[in-house]
Image (cartoon, helix red, strand yellow):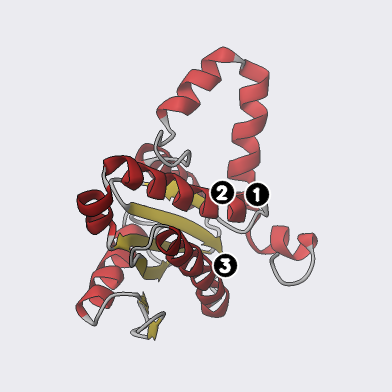
């Protein structure tokens, strides 16, 4: 759980938790209509918010001006899973990655998304690089375990960016994190790159 108390979490970044709680509450109130709308904002393969939901959430957070860090990642070795084991196994890998991220969501630690193919993202409250590193390590370990269960070498590469520029351009933080992930890949994959320039090796 987030270091400290629930009160500290809400003080630091209540809008991220509010995004999750608001969706749940409004769906209960509006019934079937909201259920259909929510389905349109959900990735069927990973049971997480999709890129449409991310666009809406970034716009909302830009208005609220709350500090968060955007983490973008994709799976290393996913193509080999599809090619060697089959697309059904690939879909299972995406679903199990979604389970890992959903576990963090359930503890109010992140808001997670499945974007396209093997691309995922999550929002972390605040601007604490150490906390981001800890969460990335947990996700990375979970992804590696998915590969081990299938006797294949699966990993992930991450890029992280803070939302300093989100007030003027909600997409700026996303593009920055994407650029950091690509930089991490250029340096050898299975790394976490921060916009500050720091690169953390997750596995050799």
Q: CA distance from mark 3 to mark 1?
A: 18 Å
Front label number (2 vs 3): 2
Please tell me which residue is depicted at 33% across the width and 84% down the height of the picture: 197
Q: Position of residue 18 (x, y in %)?
A: 64, 45
Foreground: 193 or 88? Answer: 88
Foreground: 128 or 44? Answer: 44
**Helix, strand or loop under label 2:** helix
Please tell me which residue is depicted at 53% across the width and 14% down the height of the picture: 33
Quarter in which the N terminus is drawn: bottom right
Q: Which residue is mark 2?
A: 102
Give neighbour class at mark 1: few <14, some 14-19, many 20+ (Cα, 10 Å).
few
Residue 8 image-quadrant placement = bottom right
**Residue 126 has which mark?**
3
Residue 194 image-quadrant placement = bottom left
The answer to whether residue 57 shows anywhere in this view is: yes
Q: CA distance from mark 1 to mark 2?
A: 6 Å
Q: Which residue is mark 1?
A: 106
Furthest-top residue in this view: 32
**Residue 36 has which mark?**
none
**Helix, strand or loop under label 1:** helix
Give neighbour class at mark 2: few <14, some 14-19, many 20+ (Cα, 10 Å).
many
Please tell me which residue is depicted at 35% across the width and 56% down the height of the picture: 168
Q: Compared to 172, does 195 lie above or below? A: below
Earlier-in-chain disc, 3 versus 1: 1
Q: CA distance from mark 2 to mark 3?
A: 19 Å
Q: Position of residue 76 (x, y in %)?
A: 29, 65
Earlier-in-chain disc, 2 versus 3: 2
Quarter in which the C terminus is drawn: bottom left
**Helix, strand or loop under label 3:** loop
Give neighbour class at mark 3: few <14, some 14-19, many 20+ (Cα, 10 Å).
some
The answer to whether residue 58 shows anywhere in this view is: no
């Amino acid at each position: 759980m987030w270091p400290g108390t629930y009160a500290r979490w809400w003080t630091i970044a209540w809008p991220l938790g509010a995004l999750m709680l608001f969706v749940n509450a409004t769906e209960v109130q509006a019934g079937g209509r909201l259920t259909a709308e929510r389905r349109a904002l959900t990735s069927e393969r990973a049971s997480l918010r999709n890129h449409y939901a991310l666009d809406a959430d970034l716009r909302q957070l830009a208005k609220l001006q709350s500090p968060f860090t955007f983490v973008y990642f994709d799976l290393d070795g996913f193509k080999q899973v599809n090619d060697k084991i089959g697309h059904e196994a690939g879909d299972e890998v995406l679903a199990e990655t979604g389970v890992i991220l959903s576990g963090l969501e359930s503890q109010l630690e992140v808001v997670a998304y499945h974007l396209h193919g093997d691309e995922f993202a999550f929002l972390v409250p605040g601007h604490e690089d150490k906390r981001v590193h800890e969460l990335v390590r947990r996700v990375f370990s979970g992804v590696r375990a998915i590969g081990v269960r299938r006797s294949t070498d699966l990993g992930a590469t991450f890029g992280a960016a803070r939302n300093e520029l989100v007030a003027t351009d909600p997409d700026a933080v996303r593009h920055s994190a994407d650029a950091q992930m690509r930089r991490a890949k250029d340096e050898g994959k299975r790394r976490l790159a921060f916009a500050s320039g720091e690169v953390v090796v997750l596995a050799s």
